[in-house]
Amino acid sequence: MASEEPTRQRMGVDLDTYHEFVEWVGDEPEEARLEFRARGESEDVAARTAASVGEWSLGGEEMGADREHEFSFGVPPEIEAEMGFSEPADRIEAVETALSAVAACINATVAYNALRDGIDVGDTETTVSLPVDTQVLFGHSDAFEDVVGDPEIEIEIDGTGLDDDEREKLAAYYRQSPVYGMLTHAHPNEPSVTVRGD
C-alpha cells in the first residue's frame, strides 16, 4: 500500500492549502474583501468603555454571528487618581490597544508574505510608540491634526539562510499591513453623530 504524501507545513500552516487561499484572493478580489467591526459603549465611570468585536464579513457575506470578544478600556490608575477618580482602576488605554494592533498586524503581514514567498522566518518582534498631545485631548488646543505625533516603529525579523532579495522583501512587507496603513495613511472621515435627549 502506497504511503500518503506528507503534508508540507511551516509555521503551523498547511502550505498547499495556504497557497490555494492566496491564489483565490488574487483571482476573486471582491469575494475576498474583508470588513471588520468594533463597538464600544461608555460605562458609568468617565473615560471607561466596554468594547466588543464579533461579526465580520467576507465578500459581503456575514460571518461570526456566534463570535464575541470583549475588552475593558480606560487609563492607567495613576492618571485616574490625578484626575480625581474615586476608585482608580488599571485599564488598558485605547491608544495602547491601537499600538498593539499595529504590532500584531505587522507581525502577521510578515508571516503571511514570508509563507507566500517561501522565506524561512522565525520570530518577528514589532515595537510601536506614539506621543499624544493632551492639550488637544483636553480642549486647550484645536489643532486636531496634532493630537498625536509621528509613530516610532521598530521591527526585528529572524530568518534562516536569507539571500539579499529575501532580506529586501522581509524589510518591505510591513507596508502591506492594514493596521499600519490605518495609522500612517490619510483617511479623511466625518463620523455619523446622533445626539439624543431634550
Image (spheres, rainbow, N blue to C red):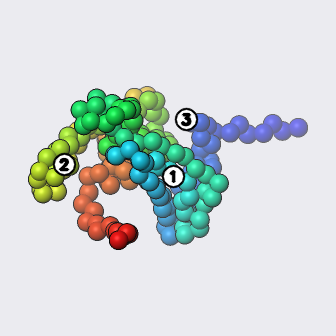
Badge 2 amino acid? Phe
From mark 2 to mark 3, how far is it between C-alphas?
Answer: 45 Å
SS assignment at label 2: loop
SS assignment at label 1: strand
Q: Quadrant of the C terminus?
A: bottom left
Which dot, 2 or 3, sits closer to the camera? 2
Residue count near mark 1 (Cα–Cα under 10 Å), binned few <14, some 14–19, many ≥20: some
Q: Residue at x 59, y 40 (%)?
A: 13
**Sequence-earlier tag: 3 or 1:** 3
Badge 1 amino acid? Val
Give the number of the disc on residue 138: 2
From mark 3 to mark 1, how far is it between C-alphas?
Answer: 26 Å
Quick check: marks 2 and 3 in contact, CB under 8 Å?
no
Q: Residue at x 58, y 50 (%)?
A: 68
Q: Residue at x 28, y 68 (%)?
A: 190
Would residue 72 appear left or right of 62 to someone viewing this image? left
